[in-house]
Amino acid sequence: MLSDAEIRGIRAKFRIFIKKVYLNSCSQGALSDSVEASFQEHLQSWHEGGSPWDLWVQKYEQMRAQFASFIGASPDEVAVVASASAGINAIASALDFGKRRKVVLGEFEFPTIGHIWLAQQPCGARPEFLTAQGDDLPVELYAKAVDEDTSIVPVTHVCFKNGFRSSVREICRIAHAKGALVLVDDYQDCGTRPVNVKELDVDFYVTGTLKYLLGPSGVAFLYVRKELIPLLEPKISGWFAQRNPFAFDVRHLDLAPSARRFESGTPPIPNIYAASAGIELLREVGLENIAVQIRKLAQLLIKGARDLGIRIKTPSDSMGPLVVLQSGNVEAIIRRLAAENVICSGRHDGLRISFHVHNTRNDVETVLELLKKNRKLMEPGTNAA
Ligand SMILES: Cc1ncc(COP(=O)(O)O)c(C=O)c1O
């Protein structure tokens, strides 16, 4: 567990806290000094080398290995892609919906997940949405829907609009018993606690660097379980998906034997420098430490909001990082908070408050104080917003 002084030291690396209370990592992670410096390092290499592609490709491979170790996978199981959507699309394009047609997914998925599988309908996919019970999506719904006709079960680990945490292990057990694959979208949790894809027993895992991994947009990761890689041939491809991109062979499709076959074009080198620095910062602080701090703050907020009589959309035992409070006028409360330099975001009827290791008990007290002052905006009402 980190001491208050250590947390202050970490917080000092994020310039935004000089002026603002930043509680919006669920949307974009705050910029640290080391991530900023890594952009400069890239610019320097560009100035000095002009086109130092050997160095840049080395950085890209180093980041693949760095992320693989971060999630307990091997580098061959990780594709570096431009967005979570790009990674999932590559998988979707490789599945054969002639044999198993159903895609079973919950209403708590991020919209891109719905769009991707709906777009596969002309290829035979039949997306089937599980209807949430308010802010709950019981695992039994998966047990009822997943059958021998199910190809894949995409599941969000933490829901972007209410902080609900899915029982990934249980869903994997249900899906695997029927021979279906599981794809976990960990965008709203990766970077907040240790993760091991082997222990989770997932087939595919995606996340991106711009939220809790404290990096920029433009880099995302797709993990594919080793045994599945040779069985899947994406219909979205490009030179970086080939066994040897630098063979410059236009006439042959020779897919890489590793998860790189799910990539396509030139990697985003500046973002790779920055993404790598974000992950390194988390590794230095320690994922266990980060998880403890986040859970403490999430629980403090939940207790404080409950004392104010505010309806909490997130389960009360939440370990964070996202706590969502119901508001009758989300846009107005976000504006009021922003006017006091407190940065949060909203989705539908939910005020999203999200924590990372740089946040403190004072941040929670500040936001609770403002919610108390603006209590009326937290009553149920019409979200014209
Ligand atoms: C859970 C989740 N998945 C996916 C995404 C979007 O992924 P991308 O834009 O990289 O495709 C988001 C973005 O907010 C998200 O919260």
Image (cartoon, rainbow, N blue to C red):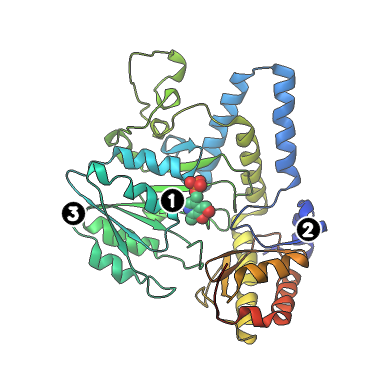
**Vertically, is 146 above or below 179?**
below
Residue visible at 61% across and 41% down in the picture: 275
Mark 1 vs 2: CB contact within 8 A: no
Residue type at mark 2? Phe
**Front-lying residue, 198 or 248:** 248
Q: CA distance from mark 3 to mark 1?
A: 23 Å
Mark toward the start of the polypeptide (1 vs 2): 2
Residue type at mark 3? Asp
Residue type at mark 1? Thr
Which element type, helix, strand or loop, lies under badge 1?
helix
Q: Tell me the residue that label 1 is attached to.
A: 112
Q: Tell me the residue that label 2 is attached to.
A: 17
Q: Which mark is residue 149?
A: 3
Q: From this viewpoint, which residue is outermost toward the right?
A: 18
Which element type, helix, strand or loop, lies under badge 2?
helix
Circle 1 Cα neighbour tier, 10 Å, few/some/many (<14 / 14–19 / ≥20): few
